[in-house]
Amino acid sequence: MAELTGQQVKEAGLAAGLDAVGIANIERLKGAPEQMQVANIFPECKSVVMTLRRIPRGVYRGIEEGTHWSNYTFYGYNRLNSFFRPLGTYRLACFIEDHGWEAVPVYPGVPEATPTRAPVREGQVGADVFPAIRIAAVAAGLGECGWSKVFLTRRFGPRQRLGMILTDAELEPDPLVEPNSICTLCMACAQTCGGHAIPHIKENKHVEIQIEDKTYRWGDVDMGKCTATHHGLNKEVSPFLARDCPGLRLNIAEQEISEEEAYKLAYTIAGGTWRKTDEFPTGHVVDYYKTMLQSTGYFAVCGANGCIRECMIRMEKAGKVENEFHEEFRKKPKWQLNYKGEVVSE
Ligand code: SF4
């Protein structure tokens, strides 16, 4: 059987269209909760190969202008995660298997939102096991979680989506990134998140993990507020909710909402139809959400205004992003709506 090295895997990943590949040994991920353990998916796993594809900066242009949203769902989120990135991951998994090692490409689900079900075999954990994809990427030396919990790299700042391959091949692990060598702790994400979901460092709400001799820390993001905002239940970032449900008052800054409640409510509203009237001729509760849901199976609305756009702007200004551009991203004052959906600044 042909020999396989980490270097060969990386070169094959780049040739398959990925922007970066990082490798962790299994030992670095042994501290994860059982329901997130990669060894519970593939007990013989020795190496975790993390795959990365960038989010083009231009994906955010339409939302930044306040004129075009669907790029965010399609090229920045759902299709990037469900089509463009997995293509390279799939090809790399085949490359590894061509060398006689099993390769398990893992689709990055949402561990927090996945209910634990009864085990199908005695002594095992229940379905579904979902590894924490960002922590695995930290363990593979690709970057670190920013204070916002968004994964940051030196090359693209906060602009990437991640994938994973588990293999029984023993590959050389990459060196870990030093904690806070990429995130500057500038707090721009916390100050500008439209969902009011990211705590300021002064609030002392954080998550901490240890990998080898390094301690990584990031803000304990309110995932209920984040999910509600991402999926358009927040008029501060959604002109669509403001237009189609003008009387609704849902002030996310003050509303306590769990992640599960946010998903249930957002998808109910997005999928909902009602009796047609002259005033609402489409019969959809929020027309845009329904359209996106029908065409992509997903709808992303918030435009990551704090955790990605603002972070990217600050990191680019600080010279912390290797993928440089001739022009600055923000060319005019940021638009802002209030919780009633009214324009408060332009
Ligand atoms: S905006 Fe980015 S760099 Fe600044 S604290 Fe947040 S994650 Fe870190």
Image (cartoon, rainbow, N blue to C red):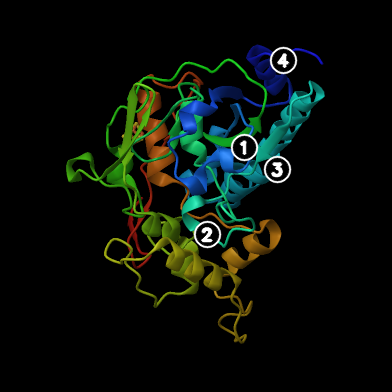
Give the foreground label among 1 and 4.
1
Q: Is residue 156 above or below residue 258?
A: above
Determine which residue is flagged by label 3.
83
Determine which residue is flagged by label 2.
116
- Disc sitting over residue 4 in the figure: 4
Determine which residue is flagged by label 1.
43
Asked if the residue under mark 1 is in contact with the one under mark 2, i.e. CB atoms within 8 Å, the reply is: no
- Dot 4: few (<14), some (14–19), or many (≥20) neighbours within 10 Å? some
- Dot 2: few (<14), some (14–19), or many (≥20) neighbours within 10 Å? few
Give the foreground label among 2 and 1.
1
- Dot 3: few (<14), some (14–19), or many (≥20) neighbours within 10 Å? some
> Residue flagged by tag 2: what amino acid is it?
Thr
Q: Residue at x 49, y 57 (%)?
A: 113
Which residue is at the front of the view, 190 or 241?
A: 190
Label 3: which secondary element = helix
Label 2: which secondary element = loop
The Cα atoms of the two marked residues, 1 and 4, are separated by 20 Å
Label 1: which secondary element = loop
The Cα atoms of the two marked residues, 2 and 1, are separated by 19 Å
Which residue is at the front of the view, 212 or 95?
A: 212
The Cα atoms of the two marked residues, 3 and 4, are separated by 27 Å
> Residue flagged by tag 3: what amino acid is it?
Phe
Relative image position of residue 276 (x, y in whole percent): 62, 85
Relative image position of residue 273 (x, y in whole percent): 61, 79
* 253 displayed left or right of 311: left
> Residue flagged by tag 1: what amino acid is it?
Pro
